[in-house]
Image (cartoon, helix red, strand yellow):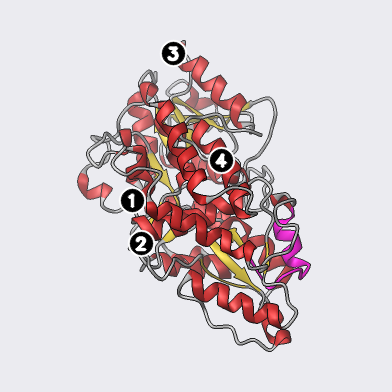
Amino acid sequence: MTDTIPGAATGAAMHRRHVLGLGLGFTATIMLGSGARAQQTSVKFWDPGLFAVSADGILNKDRSFIYRAVEAYQAANPGETIEITQNSGDITTTTNQFRAASIARNGPDMKSAYAGGGVLSFSQFIEPLDSVFPPEEQAKISGWDTVREGYRTDGSILALPYGAGSYFYVFYRPSMFQQAGVEFVEPKTWEDMLSLGEALKAKGVTPFWVCNQEGYMGAWAIAALGGGQLGANAFTEMVLKNQPINSPGLIEAYKAYADMFARGLTNPDAGQLQNGEATSGFIQGRAAMTINGAWSNAELLEALGDDVGMFPIPTLASAKEPGVLAGGPNLAVFVTNYAANKDAAFKFIKYLAEAKTMDLYVELSQTEPSNHKDADPSVIANRLLREQAERLKSVKTVYPFDNIMPQPVIDLFYRVNATVFTGQQTAEDAVAQLQAEFDKQA
């Protein structure tokens, strides 16, 4: 699947987000009985599989967040109905469907979407939520910066960010360190991590399992390294044209990233293997470490149990923002400006923003923590997710390059990530190409 929404994460996003591909959409309306129907106010909610899957990726209405949330909402609000239309899980299909319906002004009252470009791309059809969520309510929820018009700090709020998001980590196998006789000490810098890899290599153990044919691993590494060199707002500043893409800091990030392969610290075929083999190869013990995202938590724990740990992708020793964590909010919900039942939609979106509703989302999906200040951490059952949620409390985060850039720039980004890693292209040439492509989109 290819995401053609300008500014939305693609490629890598498809490997870090659980999307349910249902083909043709269907509508499921949860009713409260014939006696209530005459009084009902109906809100049409479109969801392309972002909120309707459970932790195992299967549509099970008893375990699926949006169906459970709607059932609880309707029980507490007799006479109100939320009609869930499950759109195609294919991003291009859903995008085209929503755009066409919105131009005709006969689309949904509400829609789930990817945060960042997946929301901003449709700003012409979206009702701002600034008056719906007053400052005191905004203060309880994080992630608003990913859904503000134009990514401006004073831009209108276009959607409700949902969940604390997915972040990128280095996963490691304690048993492989023990077998090699190498003490594991969590690296604080990229240089420390490569030195740890050198120690493993000297003992005959492949340090890193990398599948980077599409350049996705590069997107995660560059997010952390670039954010460290240029600051937590690095990529937002680039899209706002306050920071050039072809900056020395991004060149330094690309050089450090390519150094991993140049020093022979990965499997030799890292540039030929597709990302689909990344998790399975690591589970099979082909290397002691791998770079991936929190979306792989469940699979890794199920396969490896206690034999898996993780730490954030480290920044360079020279970082302006040392220890910044790359990743961010994935999902959002918005109300259309042509909604037939706007007030009812506002009421439901405020219900979705309640801490207990977000806790239900976390409990059922186990893919990311809540982004509400009053979240109940006890609903997190996944050990890795629990550790990640704790880390999120004390680190700065950087929203990745491929979440916010125009689509042609994102496509090029993945390509240069692949070629720079294996030494087929210089860091300087890569950032120059990215800058030129971005300038063409202006």
Q: Quadrant of residue 126?
A: top left
Q: Position of residue 95 (x, y in %)?
A: 54, 25
Check the image and report above or below for 350 versus 39.
below
| Residue at image mark 1 | 233
Left or right: 239 in relation to 95 = left
Q: Position of residue 306 (x, y in %)?
A: 66, 77
Please give the range of residues in magenta: 277-290
Which amino acid does the dot numbered 2 rest on?
Answer: Lys
In the rendered structure, does residue 135 fall within the stretch colored magenta? no
| Mark 2 vs mark 3, CA separation in Å | 40 Å
Q: Quadrant of residue 158?
A: top left
Crowd band around label 2 with a 10 angstrom C-alpha radius: few (<14), some (14–19), many (20+)? some
Tag 2 secondary structure: loop
| Dot 4 or dot 3, earlier in sequence | 4
Which amino acid does the dot numbered 1 rest on?
Answer: Asn
- Say which mark, if any, is on residue 396: 2
Q: What residue is shown at x 42% (from left), y 63% (from top)?
A: 376
The quarter of the picture where the N terminus appears is top right
Dots 3, 1 in contact, CB < 8 A? no
Crowd band around label 1 with a 10 angstrom C-alpha radius: few (<14), some (14–19), many (20+)? some
